[in-house]
Image (cartoon, rainbow, N blue to C red):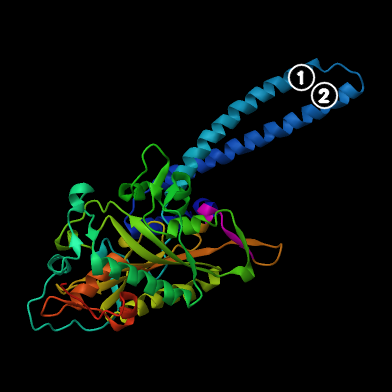
Protein backbone atom coordinates (compact mmCIF):
# COMPACT_ATOMS: atom_id res chain seq x y z
CA UNK A 1 0.00 0.00 0.00
CA UNK A 2 1.00 3.62 -0.48
CA UNK A 3 2.20 5.51 2.65
CA UNK A 4 -0.64 7.40 4.32
CA UNK A 5 1.62 10.48 4.40
CA UNK A 6 1.63 10.52 0.58
CA UNK A 7 -2.18 10.31 0.49
CA UNK A 8 -2.44 13.20 2.96
CA UNK A 9 0.35 15.46 1.78
CA UNK A 10 0.97 14.65 -1.89
CA UNK A 11 -2.33 13.64 -3.55
CA UNK A 12 -1.16 15.05 -6.89
CA UNK A 13 1.54 12.37 -7.05
CA UNK A 14 -1.17 9.72 -6.71
CA UNK A 15 -3.41 11.45 -9.25
CA UNK A 16 -0.56 11.39 -11.79
CA UNK A 17 -0.17 7.62 -11.38
CA UNK A 18 -3.94 7.02 -11.60
CA UNK A 19 -4.15 9.07 -14.79
CA UNK A 20 -1.15 7.27 -16.26
CA UNK A 21 -2.63 3.87 -15.35
CA UNK A 22 -6.00 4.90 -16.85
CA UNK A 23 -7.43 3.84 -13.48
CA UNK A 24 -10.48 5.33 -11.78
CA UNK A 25 -10.20 5.52 -8.01
CA UNK A 26 -12.18 7.53 -5.40
CA UNK A 27 -9.16 9.33 -3.94
CA UNK A 28 -11.31 12.16 -2.53
CA UNK A 29 -13.40 9.61 -0.66
CA UNK A 30 -10.29 7.98 0.80
CA UNK A 31 -8.89 11.35 1.92
CA UNK A 32 -12.25 12.28 3.47
CA UNK A 33 -12.40 8.96 5.35
CA UNK A 34 -8.85 9.53 6.57
CA UNK A 35 -9.76 13.03 7.85
CA UNK A 36 -12.82 11.61 9.59
CA UNK A 37 -10.73 8.82 11.13
CA UNK A 38 -8.15 11.29 12.45
CA UNK A 39 -10.90 13.48 13.94
CA UNK A 40 -12.55 10.49 15.62
CA UNK A 41 -9.20 9.26 16.91
CA UNK A 42 -8.54 12.63 18.54
CA UNK A 43 -11.97 12.51 20.19
CA UNK A 44 -11.37 8.99 21.47
CA UNK A 45 -7.91 9.90 22.77
CA UNK A 46 -9.34 12.93 24.61
CA UNK A 47 -12.12 10.85 26.15
CA UNK A 48 -9.62 8.24 27.32
CA UNK A 49 -7.46 10.99 28.81
CA UNK A 50 -10.44 12.47 30.69
CA UNK A 51 -11.51 9.01 31.84
CA UNK A 52 -8.04 8.41 33.28
CA UNK A 53 -8.13 11.76 35.08
CA UNK A 54 -11.50 10.94 36.70
CA UNK A 55 -10.26 7.47 37.60
CA UNK A 56 -7.29 8.99 39.43
CA UNK A 57 -9.60 11.49 41.13
CA UNK A 58 -11.83 8.67 42.40
CA UNK A 59 -8.80 6.80 43.72
CA UNK A 60 -7.58 9.88 45.63
CA UNK A 61 -11.02 10.58 47.13
CA UNK A 62 -11.45 6.97 48.22
CA UNK A 63 -8.03 7.07 49.87
CA UNK A 64 -9.17 10.10 51.88
CA UNK A 65 -12.57 8.53 52.63
CA UNK A 66 -14.51 11.09 50.61
CA UNK A 67 -17.71 10.60 48.63
CA UNK A 68 -17.20 9.60 44.96
CA UNK A 69 -20.78 9.20 43.70
CA UNK A 70 -20.56 12.18 41.33
CA UNK A 71 -17.29 10.97 39.78
CA UNK A 72 -18.59 7.41 39.41
CA UNK A 73 -21.61 8.75 37.49
CA UNK A 74 -19.25 10.76 35.29
CA UNK A 75 -17.21 7.60 34.64
CA UNK A 76 -20.34 5.71 33.65
CA UNK A 77 -21.40 8.42 31.19
CA UNK A 78 -17.88 8.71 29.80
CA UNK A 79 -17.63 4.94 29.34
CA UNK A 80 -20.84 4.96 27.28
CA UNK A 81 -19.55 7.86 25.16
CA UNK A 82 -16.25 6.06 24.65
CA UNK A 83 -17.93 2.83 23.57
CA UNK A 84 -20.03 4.75 21.02
CA UNK A 85 -17.00 6.63 19.68
CA UNK A 86 -14.87 3.47 19.52
CA UNK A 87 -17.57 1.75 17.47
CA UNK A 88 -17.70 4.74 15.11
CA UNK A 89 -13.94 4.83 14.62
CA UNK A 90 -13.90 1.08 14.04
CA UNK A 91 -16.43 1.41 11.20
CA UNK A 92 -14.53 4.35 9.69
CA UNK A 93 -11.22 2.48 9.93
CA UNK A 94 -12.66 -0.58 8.14
CA UNK A 95 -13.96 1.57 5.26
CA UNK A 96 -10.71 3.54 5.11
CA UNK A 97 -8.51 0.45 5.12
CA UNK A 98 -10.55 -1.38 2.47
CA UNK A 99 -10.28 1.59 0.11
CA UNK A 100 -6.63 2.21 0.97
CA UNK A 101 -5.71 -1.42 0.24
CA UNK A 102 -7.22 -1.08 -3.25
CA UNK A 103 -5.25 2.03 -4.16
CA UNK A 104 -2.81 1.02 -6.96
CA UNK A 105 0.95 1.24 -6.48
CA UNK A 106 2.86 4.30 -7.64
CA UNK A 107 4.49 3.71 -11.01
CA UNK A 108 8.24 3.71 -11.55
CA UNK A 109 9.35 6.64 -13.75
CA UNK A 110 10.64 4.14 -16.35
CA UNK A 111 7.11 2.86 -17.10
CA UNK A 112 5.82 4.20 -20.45
CA UNK A 113 2.28 5.50 -20.80
CA UNK A 114 -0.26 3.31 -22.57
CA UNK A 115 -3.58 1.47 -22.24
CA UNK A 116 -3.02 -2.16 -23.23
CA UNK A 117 -0.26 -4.68 -23.94
CA UNK A 118 -0.14 -3.30 -27.48
CA UNK A 119 1.53 -0.21 -25.97
CA UNK A 120 4.30 -2.16 -24.22
CA UNK A 121 7.78 -1.13 -25.37
CA UNK A 122 10.36 -3.62 -26.63
CA UNK A 123 13.62 -3.57 -24.69
CA UNK A 124 15.58 -6.36 -26.38
CA UNK A 125 15.29 -9.45 -28.56
CA UNK A 126 17.27 -12.68 -28.57
CA UNK A 127 17.46 -15.49 -31.12
CA UNK A 128 16.24 -15.79 -34.69
CA UNK A 129 13.07 -17.57 -35.84
CA UNK A 130 13.78 -21.04 -37.22
CA UNK A 131 13.36 -21.23 -40.99
CA UNK A 132 11.37 -24.41 -41.34
CA UNK A 133 11.46 -26.16 -44.73
CA UNK A 134 8.20 -27.98 -44.05
CA UNK A 135 4.68 -27.15 -42.96
CA UNK A 136 4.81 -26.63 -39.20
CA UNK A 137 2.32 -27.83 -36.60
CA UNK A 138 1.09 -26.26 -33.38
CA UNK A 139 2.18 -27.78 -30.09
CA UNK A 140 -1.31 -29.26 -29.59
CA UNK A 141 -1.25 -30.95 -32.98
CA UNK A 142 2.19 -32.37 -32.22
CA UNK A 143 1.15 -33.53 -28.75
CA UNK A 144 -1.96 -35.31 -30.05
CA UNK A 145 -0.06 -37.06 -32.83
CA UNK A 146 2.66 -38.16 -30.39
CA UNK A 147 -0.01 -39.31 -27.90
CA UNK A 148 1.50 -37.31 -25.05
CA UNK A 149 -1.64 -35.34 -24.15
CA UNK A 150 -5.23 -36.36 -23.44
CA UNK A 151 -8.13 -33.91 -23.76
CA UNK A 152 -10.45 -36.16 -21.73
CA UNK A 153 -9.70 -33.81 -18.81
CA UNK A 154 -12.10 -31.26 -20.32
CA UNK A 155 -14.92 -33.75 -19.73
CA UNK A 156 -14.01 -34.84 -16.21
CA UNK A 157 -12.63 -31.51 -14.93
CA UNK A 158 -13.37 -28.74 -17.42
CA UNK A 159 -11.91 -26.63 -20.18
CA UNK A 160 -8.32 -25.55 -19.59
CA UNK A 161 -7.21 -28.85 -18.05
CA UNK A 162 -5.25 -31.67 -19.70
CA UNK A 163 -3.74 -35.02 -18.87
CA UNK A 164 -0.01 -34.74 -19.65
CA UNK A 165 1.29 -38.17 -20.61
CA UNK A 166 4.59 -39.98 -20.97
CA UNK A 167 7.35 -37.72 -22.31
CA UNK A 168 5.28 -34.53 -21.99
CA UNK A 169 4.80 -35.16 -18.27
CA UNK A 170 8.51 -35.99 -18.05
CA UNK A 171 9.35 -32.74 -19.85
CA UNK A 172 7.28 -30.77 -17.35
CA UNK A 173 9.24 -32.21 -14.41
CA UNK A 174 12.52 -31.90 -16.30
CA UNK A 175 12.02 -28.16 -16.76
CA UNK A 176 11.15 -27.71 -13.10
CA UNK A 177 14.25 -29.56 -11.90
CA UNK A 178 16.42 -27.76 -14.45
CA UNK A 179 15.27 -24.33 -13.22
CA UNK A 180 15.56 -25.32 -9.55
CA UNK A 181 19.12 -26.60 -10.03
CA UNK A 182 20.19 -23.46 -11.89
CA UNK A 183 18.80 -21.14 -9.22
CA UNK A 184 19.83 -23.07 -6.11
CA UNK A 185 23.37 -23.11 -7.48
CA UNK A 186 23.15 -19.30 -7.48
CA UNK A 187 22.18 -19.23 -3.81
CA UNK A 188 18.38 -19.19 -4.01
CA UNK A 189 16.64 -21.09 -1.21
CA UNK A 190 14.11 -23.67 -2.40
CA UNK A 191 10.59 -23.36 -0.99
CA UNK A 192 7.51 -25.46 -1.65
CA UNK A 193 4.72 -23.42 -0.03
CA UNK A 194 1.16 -24.36 0.94
CA UNK A 195 -0.99 -24.52 -2.17
CA UNK A 196 -3.77 -22.44 -0.61
CA UNK A 197 -3.98 -19.24 1.43
CA UNK A 198 -6.55 -17.70 3.70
CA UNK A 199 -8.28 -14.63 2.29
CA UNK A 200 -6.83 -12.42 5.02
CA UNK A 201 -3.27 -13.34 4.02
CA UNK A 202 -4.11 -13.10 0.31
CA UNK A 203 -5.46 -9.58 0.73
CA UNK A 204 -2.10 -8.51 2.08
CA UNK A 205 -0.01 -10.35 -0.51
CA UNK A 206 -1.87 -8.96 -3.54
CA UNK A 207 -4.94 -7.06 -4.69
CA UNK A 208 -7.28 -9.92 -3.90
CA UNK A 209 -10.56 -8.29 -5.01
CA UNK A 210 -9.44 -8.24 -8.64
CA UNK A 211 -7.49 -11.48 -8.30
CA UNK A 212 -10.62 -13.24 -6.98
CA UNK A 213 -12.04 -13.16 -10.50
CA UNK A 214 -9.20 -15.46 -11.55
CA UNK A 215 -8.87 -17.58 -8.41
CA UNK A 216 -10.40 -20.86 -7.31
CA UNK A 217 -11.98 -20.66 -3.87
CA UNK A 218 -12.20 -23.67 -1.57
CA UNK A 219 -15.87 -24.30 -0.74
CA UNK A 220 -17.02 -23.60 2.82
CA UNK A 221 -13.66 -22.10 3.79
CA UNK A 222 -11.95 -18.71 3.62
CA UNK A 223 -9.13 -20.22 1.54
CA UNK A 224 -8.11 -19.90 -2.11
CA UNK A 225 -5.89 -22.08 -4.27
CA UNK A 226 -2.74 -20.12 -5.10
CA UNK A 227 -2.14 -18.55 -8.51
CA UNK A 228 1.62 -18.36 -7.91
CA UNK A 229 4.05 -19.41 -5.16
CA UNK A 230 5.07 -15.75 -4.73
CA UNK A 231 2.04 -15.00 -2.55
CA UNK A 232 2.44 -17.71 0.12
CA UNK A 233 6.23 -17.23 0.18
CA UNK A 234 6.08 -13.49 0.81
CA UNK A 235 3.24 -14.04 3.31
CA UNK A 236 5.63 -16.36 5.19
CA UNK A 237 7.41 -13.19 6.37
CA UNK A 238 4.32 -11.31 7.59
CA UNK A 239 5.27 -9.05 10.55
CA UNK A 240 8.95 -10.07 10.35
CA UNK A 241 11.82 -7.69 11.08
CA UNK A 242 15.15 -8.55 9.45
CA UNK A 243 18.58 -7.44 10.51
CA UNK A 244 20.21 -5.61 7.57
CA UNK A 245 22.88 -8.34 7.24
CA UNK A 246 20.14 -10.92 6.67
CA UNK A 247 19.16 -9.27 3.40
CA UNK A 248 18.71 -10.10 0.62
CA UNK A 249 16.50 -13.15 1.06
CA UNK A 250 16.44 -15.05 -2.23
CA UNK A 251 13.88 -17.77 -2.84
CA UNK A 252 13.06 -20.16 -5.64
CA UNK A 253 9.47 -21.30 -5.23
CA UNK A 254 7.94 -24.41 -6.79
CA UNK A 255 4.21 -25.06 -6.94
CA UNK A 256 1.24 -25.81 -9.12
CA UNK A 257 -0.72 -22.66 -10.01
CA UNK A 258 -4.49 -22.47 -10.34
CA UNK A 259 -6.11 -19.74 -12.45
CA UNK A 260 -9.51 -19.47 -14.11
CA UNK A 261 -8.06 -17.50 -17.05
CA UNK A 262 -11.50 -16.00 -17.61
CA UNK A 263 -12.25 -14.19 -20.85
CA UNK A 264 -9.36 -15.62 -22.89
CA UNK A 265 -9.77 -16.13 -26.61
CA UNK A 266 -7.85 -16.55 -29.83
CA UNK A 267 -5.66 -19.19 -31.40
CA UNK A 268 -3.84 -20.08 -28.18
CA UNK A 269 -6.96 -20.42 -26.03
CA UNK A 270 -6.72 -24.16 -26.61
CA UNK A 271 -3.63 -26.08 -25.57
CA UNK A 272 -0.95 -25.34 -23.01
CA UNK A 273 -0.89 -21.53 -23.16
CA UNK A 274 -3.97 -20.79 -21.05
CA UNK A 275 -4.04 -23.80 -18.73
CA UNK A 276 -6.07 -23.45 -15.55
CA UNK A 277 -3.57 -25.64 -13.70
CA UNK A 278 0.14 -25.52 -14.46
CA UNK A 279 3.48 -25.78 -12.69
CA UNK A 280 5.75 -22.81 -12.17
CA UNK A 281 9.19 -22.11 -10.76
CA UNK A 282 9.23 -18.62 -9.26
CA UNK A 283 11.94 -16.24 -8.10
CA UNK A 284 11.34 -13.96 -5.12
CA UNK A 285 13.77 -11.51 -3.52
CA UNK A 286 13.37 -9.43 -0.37
CA UNK A 287 15.98 -6.68 -0.23
CA UNK A 288 16.94 -3.22 0.99
CA UNK A 289 15.52 -0.38 -1.12
CA UNK A 290 18.90 0.67 -2.50
CA UNK A 291 19.44 -2.80 -4.05
CA UNK A 292 16.16 -2.94 -5.98
CA UNK A 293 17.58 -2.36 -9.46
CA UNK A 294 20.45 -4.82 -8.94
CA UNK A 295 18.14 -7.69 -8.04
CA UNK A 296 15.48 -6.79 -10.60
CA UNK A 297 18.16 -7.12 -13.28
CA UNK A 298 19.50 -10.31 -11.71
CA UNK A 299 16.12 -12.05 -11.83
CA UNK A 300 15.58 -10.89 -15.40
CA UNK A 301 18.92 -12.33 -16.46
CA UNK A 302 18.18 -15.60 -14.63
CA UNK A 303 14.93 -16.08 -16.54
CA UNK A 304 16.47 -15.15 -19.88
CA UNK A 305 19.46 -17.44 -19.34
CA UNK A 306 17.19 -20.40 -18.63
CA UNK A 307 15.43 -19.90 -21.96
CA UNK A 308 18.56 -19.12 -23.96
CA UNK A 309 19.94 -22.50 -22.89
CA UNK A 310 16.71 -24.04 -24.18
CA UNK A 311 17.31 -22.26 -27.51
CA UNK A 312 13.94 -20.55 -27.50
CA UNK A 313 13.87 -17.12 -29.19
CA UNK A 314 12.33 -14.37 -27.07
CA UNK A 315 11.88 -10.66 -26.66
CA UNK A 316 11.65 -8.50 -23.53
CA UNK A 317 9.16 -5.66 -23.17
CA UNK A 318 8.48 -3.15 -20.42
CA UNK A 319 4.79 -3.08 -19.64
CA UNK A 320 3.02 0.21 -20.22
CA UNK A 321 1.11 1.96 -17.42
CA UNK A 322 -2.23 0.38 -18.34
CA UNK A 323 -0.73 -3.13 -18.45
CA UNK A 324 1.23 -2.92 -15.19
CA UNK A 325 -0.48 -4.86 -12.37
CA UNK A 326 -1.99 -2.66 -9.66
CA UNK A 327 0.36 -4.00 -7.00
CA UNK A 328 3.51 -3.46 -9.08
CA UNK A 329 5.60 -0.36 -9.75
CA UNK A 330 7.27 -1.81 -12.86
CA UNK A 331 6.99 -5.05 -14.86
CA UNK A 332 9.08 -6.56 -17.63
CA UNK A 333 7.46 -9.33 -19.66
CA UNK A 334 9.57 -11.87 -21.53
CA UNK A 335 7.67 -13.18 -24.53
CA UNK A 336 8.54 -16.46 -26.22
CA UNK A 337 8.32 -16.95 -29.97
CA UNK A 338 5.53 -19.27 -31.14
CA UNK A 339 5.33 -21.11 -34.46
CA UNK A 340 2.86 -18.59 -35.87
CA UNK A 341 5.58 -15.92 -35.65
CA UNK A 342 4.03 -14.16 -32.66
CA UNK A 343 5.76 -13.47 -29.34
CA UNK A 344 3.60 -14.27 -26.32
CA UNK A 345 4.17 -13.54 -22.63
CA UNK A 346 5.63 -16.39 -20.59
CA UNK A 347 7.63 -14.59 -17.88
CA UNK A 348 6.80 -11.57 -15.74
CA UNK A 349 9.44 -9.82 -13.67
CA UNK A 350 8.17 -7.15 -11.27
CA UNK A 351 9.09 -4.88 -8.41
CA UNK A 352 6.44 -3.77 -5.96
CA UNK A 353 8.97 -1.59 -4.07
CA UNK A 354 7.63 -1.34 -0.47
CA UNK A 355 3.94 -1.63 -1.48
CA UNK A 356 3.63 -5.33 -0.64
CA UNK A 357 5.88 -5.06 2.43
CA UNK A 358 3.66 -2.35 3.93
CA UNK A 359 0.61 -4.58 3.53
CA UNK A 360 2.40 -7.49 5.22
CA UNK A 361 4.38 -5.32 7.67
CA UNK A 362 7.81 -6.64 6.67
CA UNK A 363 10.70 -4.43 7.81
CA UNK A 364 14.42 -4.44 8.46
CA UNK A 365 16.57 -2.64 11.02
CA UNK A 366 18.96 -0.22 9.35
CA UNK A 367 21.13 -0.43 12.47
CA UNK A 368 20.89 -3.01 15.23
CA UNK A 369 18.01 -2.06 17.53
CA UNK A 370 17.70 1.16 15.55
CA UNK A 371 15.54 2.72 12.88
CA UNK A 372 13.26 0.35 10.98
CA UNK A 373 12.32 0.63 7.33
CA UNK A 374 10.10 -1.38 5.00
CA UNK A 375 11.87 -3.87 2.74
CA UNK A 376 11.38 -4.03 -1.03
CA UNK A 377 9.90 -7.19 -2.59
CA UNK A 378 10.55 -8.35 -6.15
CA UNK A 379 9.29 -11.41 -7.99
CA UNK A 380 9.83 -13.03 -11.36
CA UNK A 381 8.85 -16.17 -13.18
CA UNK A 382 11.79 -18.49 -13.76
CA UNK A 383 9.84 -21.04 -15.82
CA UNK A 384 6.10 -21.47 -16.23
CA UNK A 385 6.37 -25.00 -17.59
CA UNK A 386 3.26 -25.07 -19.77
CA UNK A 387 4.26 -22.00 -21.80
CA UNK A 388 7.92 -22.97 -22.01
CA UNK A 389 6.94 -26.48 -23.15
CA UNK A 390 4.68 -24.98 -25.80
CA UNK A 391 7.48 -22.79 -27.22
CA UNK A 392 10.02 -25.61 -26.96
CA UNK A 393 7.77 -28.05 -28.84
CA UNK A 394 6.94 -25.60 -31.61
CA UNK A 395 10.48 -24.26 -32.09
CA UNK A 396 12.17 -27.68 -31.95
CA UNK A 397 9.79 -29.73 -34.07
CA UNK A 398 11.09 -31.82 -36.95
CA UNK A 399 9.74 -32.71 -40.39
CA UNK A 400 8.89 -36.16 -39.02
CA UNK A 401 6.64 -34.65 -36.34
CA UNK A 402 9.15 -35.30 -33.56
CA UNK A 403 10.43 -32.84 -30.96
CA UNK A 404 14.14 -32.30 -30.40
CA UNK A 405 15.11 -32.04 -26.74
CA UNK A 406 17.65 -29.26 -26.08
CA UNK A 407 20.98 -30.65 -24.91
CA UNK A 408 20.84 -28.69 -21.66
CA UNK A 409 17.91 -30.76 -20.33
CA UNK A 410 18.59 -34.15 -21.91
CA UNK A 411 20.01 -35.47 -18.65
CA UNK A 412 16.68 -34.60 -16.96
CA UNK A 413 14.88 -36.59 -19.68
CA UNK A 414 16.78 -39.85 -19.12
CA UNK A 415 19.24 -38.77 -21.85
CA UNK A 416 16.57 -38.78 -24.54
CA UNK A 417 17.35 -36.57 -27.52
CA UNK A 418 13.88 -36.57 -29.06
CA UNK A 419 10.27 -37.00 -28.17
CA UNK A 420 8.85 -39.34 -30.80
CA UNK A 421 6.14 -41.88 -31.36
CA UNK A 422 6.60 -45.14 -29.50
Q: In which quarter of the image is residue 238?
A: bottom right
Q: Residue furthest left?
A: 135
Residue 116, position in %: x, y? 26, 61
User: Residue 94 at x, y = what percent?
Assistant: 50, 38
Q: Earlier in the sequence, mark 2 or mark 1?
A: 2
* CB within 8 Å, label 2 to label 1: yes
At 52% across and 50% down in the image, what residue appears?
Answer: 8
Which residues are drawn in magenta?
358-365
In the image, residue 181 lies at what x, y percent? 43, 75
Q: Mark 1 points at which residue?
A: 72
* Residue density around tag 1, few if under 14, some if 14–19, many if 20 or more, within 10 Å: some
The disc label shown at residue 5, or none: none
Rendering coords of residue 295 (x, y %) = 48, 74
Query: 104 or 40: which is nearer to us?
Result: 104
Asked whether 362 falls inside the magenta stretch, the response is yes
Q: Which residue carries the number 2 mark?
A: 58
Q: How far apart are marks 2 and 1 (CA)?
A: 7 Å
Q: Residue at x 70, y 20 (%)?
A: 76
Q: Can residue 337 be seen in this view?
A: no
Amino acid sequence: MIPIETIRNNPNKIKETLEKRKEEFPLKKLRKLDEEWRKQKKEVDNLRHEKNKINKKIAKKKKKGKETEQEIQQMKEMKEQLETKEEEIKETEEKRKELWMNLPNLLDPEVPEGKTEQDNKERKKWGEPTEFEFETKTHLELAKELDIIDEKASEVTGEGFYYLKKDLAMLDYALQKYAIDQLTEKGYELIEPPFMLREEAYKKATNVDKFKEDMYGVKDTDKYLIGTSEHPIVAMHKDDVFQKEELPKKYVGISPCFRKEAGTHGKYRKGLYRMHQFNKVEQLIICKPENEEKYFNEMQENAEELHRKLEIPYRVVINCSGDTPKTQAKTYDTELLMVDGEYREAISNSTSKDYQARRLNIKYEKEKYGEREYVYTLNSTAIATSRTMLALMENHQTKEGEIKIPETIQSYMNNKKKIKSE
